[in-house]
Amino acid sequence: QKHQESLPSDKSERFSSSGFIFAAIGSAVGLGNMWKFPYITGQYGGAAFFLLFVVCLVVVGLPVLLAELAIGRGGRGSASSSFVKLSGKKVWGGLGMVSVIAPFVILSFYAIVAGWTLHYAVQAFSGKLVPNTDFTLMYGGFMESYTPIIWQAVVLVLVGAIVVKGISGGIEKFNKILIPGMFILLVVLMIRALTLPGAGAGVSFFLNPDFSKLTPESTLVALGHAFFSLSLGMGTMITYGSYVAKRQSLGTATLAIGTGDLLYALIAGLIIFPTTFSFGINPGQGPGLVFIALPAAFSEMPFGSFFGGLFFILLAIAALTSAVSLLEVPVKYVMDRFGWNRTRSVWIFIIGCFILGVPASLSLGVSPGLTFGGMAFFDWIDFAASNVLLPLGGLIVTIFAGYFYKGVADEAGLTALWFRVWLFLLRFVAPILVVFVFLHSAGIIKF
Ligand code: VAL
């Protein structure tokens, strides 16, 4: 009974138990799974990289995920105030701010790429994916226009409109409909991809590991991606955890979220690699894989406009369910800290993300002047968030949960043996690996 009282008194600011699982899977499954994962897998050697990703997910990702959920539910506050409530020390609130700033920065470029997916969905459904088109040129032309800004604004308004409705009436409702919907779309597209002539080569590229391809660098990329993909180090799981009832098992939730994230990545790979291989397209071409190579493949396929459209809708849904979780972090923070109401908090951050996002978007085409030190402004904010703030936020979580959070055993609710394993991973394995990722991705160590 005492536990229940610690839930926010406003019933609309809580998750139901299934609602929480859907929302957390929605947060995890995003552009990371469908856009980034396929192209880094393509670049770092296919199946061996995929295997490495699975290992990183299990050994480091899941323990940190459980730690974030426990901190959120134990502290019942934002990604900053939960730390203070659990430790009684203000300094942790300051450290927690890393996890409040990161999602804001991520959202400002995430919404841009999410906007591209909507644009490509419209292009596909309106029959623009025709054979013999130069899709590199098409992508370039799109970047050189102001159209991406419009789509970015559309995405941000949609995200704001969902989050403004609160936890149970907004985020939960939206995810409960879209996550199963997304699964159906994925399966339809997977069947289409796997039945293409020559699909087998793509499947074996993705699922037959060649261990000679593994390098220290690919290991760190895999680990960094496990963080990004599970939405760790960006305060979202702490924030979502703060809306969860005490009777819910966080261990089970962690397994469900991890399995969901992996399953969606697996199916995305089983769509993208068979499709590209079937049309003789090289999957190792980087970020353009989804926006250049795949449209080219869809254009050659019977009913390609339809399947291409479905694919981009799928991407847009994945992006939206993640974007709402990113926005909720700073929103919850100002609601907690300054007592702002939800409406005001939501729209202020939406405007903020737009202001930061516009130059980022323009830096990719219209305004080449927005390039500093050889890197576009877009890449700078991606770099700052993904390679600096995120590993730092993750490190703070592992150190806090591993060494400073006294009641962590109660909150995690694991059996004695699993608790020991978890604590070991959290205290020693995760922080050391995260430090390596940080040093590597910040360019401080090189292999
Ligand atoms: N986890 C999501 C993704 O993989 C976001 C929130 C970074 O795209």
Image: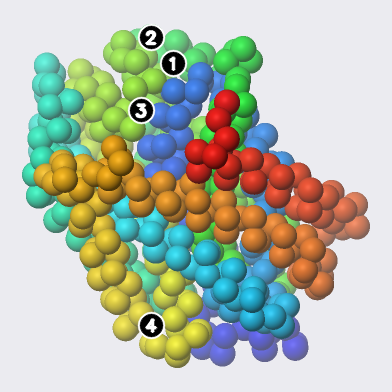
Q: Nearer the viewer, mark 4 or mark 1?
A: 4
Instruction: Judge the density around disc 3: few (<14), some (14-19), many (≥20) Cα neighbours within 10 Å.
Output: some
Q: Nearer the viewer, mark 2 or mark 4?
A: 4
Q: Type of residue at label 2?
A: Gly
Return the residue nearer the eye: 381 or 23: 381
Q: CA distance from mark 3 to mark 2?
A: 22 Å
State the residue position of label 2: 198
Identified at 67% across, 69% down, the residue is: 71
Q: Position of residue 22 (x, y in %)?
A: 51, 58
**Left or right: 436 as drawn, with respect to 425:** left
Which residue lies under the disc numbered 3? 286
Q: Which residue is mark 4?
A: 342
Q: How packed is label 4: few (under 14 Cα within 10 Å), some, or many (20 or more)? A: some
> Against 282, is 304 above or below?
below
Q: Are marks 2 and 1 in contact (CB under 8 Å)?
A: yes
Mark 4 vs 3, N-terminal side: 3
Image point (78%, 53%), residue name: 427
Q: Nearer the viewer, mark 2 or mark 1?
A: 1
- Measured along the vertical axis of the image, is residue 239 above or below residue 395? below
**Mark earlier in primary sequence (2, 4):** 2
